Amino acid sequence: MQPECVVDEPQSQTPLNNNIRELFNLMNFLDPQNWDDLPGLEAKFETLDESLLSELHEMLKPYFLRRTKAMVLSLPPKVLRCGCELRAPTDNMRRTNSLYP
């Protein structure tokens, strides 16, 4: 049985091509309820001035994780925790070794 996994986050880390339509399409993918009027958003933010840019930043802020270098450097060390018991399959290994010496 394979665990079911649903990922709803684009994490390409590639820069947008200075295309506001591409940004709105990604945001529509993440949250279609709040970013459903793509033509309206394109028309509203077609020419950005200081106030519109500030408004757009506020709209985008809940969706982006911003970490500074100082925050990343002060992270605790990684710890690997395994909740399962690991066991070497010796019977299968012996059988395989006897078939393929």
Image (tube, rainbow, N blue to C red):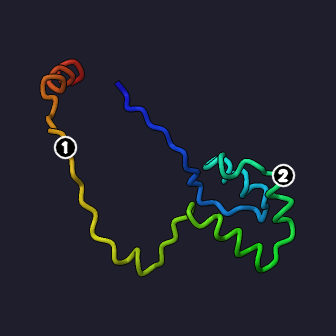
Q: Residue at x 33, y 72 (%)?
A: 75
Image height of 17 relative to 84, above or below = below
Q: Quadrant of the C terminus?
A: top left
Residue 64, x across and y down, in percent: 56, 64
Please provide percent x and percent y for residue 51: 76, 77
* Quadrant in the picture for the N terminus: top left
Give neighbour class at mark 1: few <14, some 14-19, many 20+ (Cα, 10 Å): few
In the picture shown, does residue 94 fall above or below 65? above
| Left or right: 91 as drawn, with respect to 3 | left
Left or right for 10, reference 83: right
Amino acid identity at mark 1: Gly
Instruction: Pick whichever, 28 or 87, lies toward us.
Output: 28
State the SS at label 1: loop
Of 81 and 94, nearer the camera is 81
Q: Nearer the viewer, mark 1 or mark 2?
A: 2
Report the side of 70 relative to 37 (left or right). left
Expressed as whole percent of the image width and height from the top left, the position of residue 45 reads: 81, 65
Labels 1 and 2: the sequence-earlier one? 2
Seen at 45% across and 79% down, the residue is 69
Q: In this figure, which residue is indicated by the disc labeled 1?
A: 83
Q: Amino acid at mark 2?
A: Pro
Label at residue 39: 2
Along the viewing direction, whichever of 64 and 75 lies nearer the viewer? 64
